[in-house]
Image (cartoon, rainbow, N blue to C red):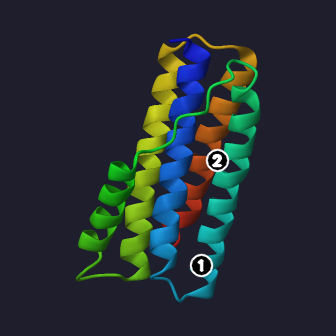
Amino acid sequence: MDNNINTLDELNKGCCMGVDALDIILEKVDNNEFRNLLEEQKAAYTELEVKLNDLYSEYTSDEIHETSKMIKAMTRYGIKKDTILDNSISKLADLLINGTNMGIIEGRKLLNNKTMDKKVHKLCSEYVTMQERYIEKLKEFL
């Protein structure tokens, strides 16, 4: 598979998982400041998804790959399980930091180990930088 397409697919999966996790966690949040941050992060993922889809069409006419229903269900179950006894803002921020960190690791692996066009590389870097920025903001809620 073309490295550009593979990279864009992986980034899109990360964005989809981020949006899914944020949607689940937003159901549990009543603190306005924390809610605003999560909605801002969700909007950043959504904006990145639009860029990914636009760039994807430059490489193939196929549909961009998204996360499966099974992975979405596992994400929902994992968050519910991890917050059953503690759904404090600190716990929710901790979960989001861990998930976002997984996205950063995956993005860095793509940047370090895949040869890709400049446009794809730039978008991959934007994905990693955006996530790093939100980890710093989420740390304030630990």
Q: Residue at x 60, y 29 (%)?
A: 8
Give the camera-side residue of 139 and 36.
36
Amino acid carrying label 2: it is: Met
User: Where does the C terminus fall, quadrant-wise?
Assistant: bottom left
Q: Residue at x 64, y 47 (%)?
A: 130
| 87 horizontally vs 13: left or right | left
Give the camera-side residue of 38 and 140.
38
In this rendering, the answer to whether 42 lies above or below 25 is above
Residue 68 lies, in percent from the top left, at 40, 45
User: Mark 1 highlights which residue?
Assistant: 35
Residue 108 lies, in percent from the top left, at 50, 29
Amino acid carrying label 1: it is: Arg
| 44 horizontally vs 91: left or right | right
Earlier along the polypeptide chain: callout 1 or callout 2? 1
Q: Quadrant of residue 124?
A: top right
Q: Residue at x 44, y 58 (%)?
A: 97
In this rendering, the answer to whether 123 lies above or below 35 is above
- Most extreme residue toward the bottom is 30
